[in-house]
Image (cartoon, coloured by chain):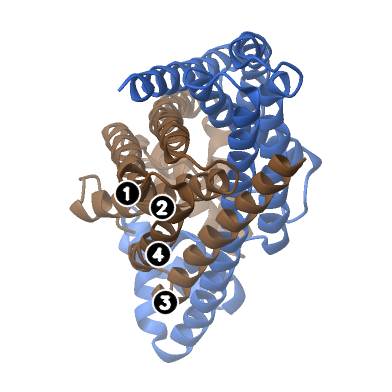
Chain colours: A blue, B brown
Amino acid sequence: MHHEQHLKSSDTIRDIVIGMSDGLTVPFALAAGLSGAVNSSGIVVTAGIAEIVAGSIAMGLGGFLAGRTESDHYTSELKREYEEIERVPEQEKQEVREVFADFGLSEHLQHQIADEMAKDKDKWVDFMMRYELGLEKPLANRATQSAITIGVSYIVGGIIPLSPYFFEHDSQTALYYSCGITMVCLFVFGYFKSKVTGQPAFLGAVKVLFIGALAAAAAFIMAKLINAA
Amino acid sequence: MHHEQHLKSSDTIRDIVIGMSDGLTVPFALAAGLSGAVNSSGIVVTAGIAEIVAGSIAMGLGGFLAGRTESDHYTSELKREYEEIERVPEQEKQEVREVFADFGLSEHLQHQIADEMAKDKDKWVDFMMRYELGLEKPLANRATQSAITIGVSYIVGGIIPLSPYFFEHDSQTALYYSCGITMVCLFVFGYFKSKVTGQPAFLGAVKVLFIGALAAAAAFIMAKLINAA
């Protein structure tokens, strides 16, 4: 049981890779979809930038506020547990015993554990928080930093599929370049995303690439259909 | 310690509310952004539909594949733990003792717990999975159903801010209606989203509304700036 309380640089790398590989997907698909409906790259760029701004705010700010809420929730539950072990200690001991009853330990041992654990109130509460309520102490700064990192990486990831549209006025031509660049990037970032989240890397890369390609193809076809209607 | 293994209808409601409130945000902001740059609702509708298709595929399929990966990971770790308690039982017992050492239990009690737990191999492995590795048994079907529900709800949520653009040709006028409808919906879905995820409901509703409004305003301003450049 190691509960690391410090920020690791690998966490930041993880957030960057997640934000970038996600950022590649939807802006890429949106740009591909619009390229199927309009000829001017200008509109694709405008829509793409609007999506990237909206997506990064929703993701970054949403993550930040969710982190704050989680942190508040933990603090209020912690306060409640401290109150409960003072107010109804026998009931709280019974809850400790129930955790171990679930793992088939004898009643005798259950009582011993609960009695011994009750001697140190901080550790008792820590145990209840983690194993009765399933709550880990949230790292408030970590959530904020993570949200900002993911949001910024989403912007950087989203710029990649849009970049050909900056230079090439004809959206159809730009689409070919965008597909080429983005497919390579989706695979590379999907590979690292899987590595840093502990999944099989090659398979993970193929999955990320597949999702991106499917989303882009579906958006392209839908946009074509709407335009033809 | 209750680990419910059956699907609850409230989980589905939770997924619907999450998908809808998220679906409202980015398509709304994208439509608002484009309305600041183009006059025709047609382009807004095309871009909006393309975003909804891309976003729901990325979210739904991404969630589905992530669920599958999590399930595979659990199965392989479970196999490894069963092998380890056969191959190095003393080391695994030591790991059980370490969990309880962290909670300040005496060495005598640590040994008793480890010895008694080792009598039932299934419960021993279950304990290691949950408390040493922090892994809960994933519900494979649950992940799939959840991903589909969130994806579909994202589509429904995304249609709401776009709907005025279907009927009103002038994108500026459509934007006013879209803002009105979406602000109300963001608040209502934000309220229920907070309710079902166990957060303070009114405050949560304000947060969801605030994120949506900020994302839309930022997208609108960015699109205006790009268009003016």
List the residue tagged with mark 1. Answer: B15
- Please report contact status of discs 3 and 4: CB closer than 8 Å, yes or no: no
Residue B106 sits in quarter: bottom right
Residue pictured at 37% horizontal, 38% vertical: B137
Q: CA distance from mark 4 to mark 1?
A: 25 Å
Residue B204 shows in this picture = yes
- Label 4 vs label 2, nearer the camera: 2
- On what subunit does the disc labeled 2 rest? B
Q: Is residue A52 above or below residue A82?
A: above
Q: CA distance from mark 3 to mark 4?
A: 19 Å
Q: Is residue A43 above or below residue A211?
A: below
Q: Earlier in the sequence, mark 2 or mark 3?
A: 2
Answer yes or no: are tags 3 and 1 on the same subunit: yes
**What's under tag 1, amino acid-wise?**
Asp
List the residue tagged with mark 3. Answer: B202
**What's under tag 4, amino acid-wise?**
Gly
Q: CA distance from mark 2 to mark 1?
A: 29 Å
Residue B125 sits in quarter: top left
Q: Earlier in the sequence, mark 4 or mark 2?
A: 2
Residue occupying the far right of the picture? A9
**What's under tag 2, amino acid-wise?**
Ala
- Label 2 vs label 3, nearer the camera: 2
In percent of width and height, residue A42 lies at 65, 28
Label 3: few (<14), some or many (≥20) within 10 Å? some
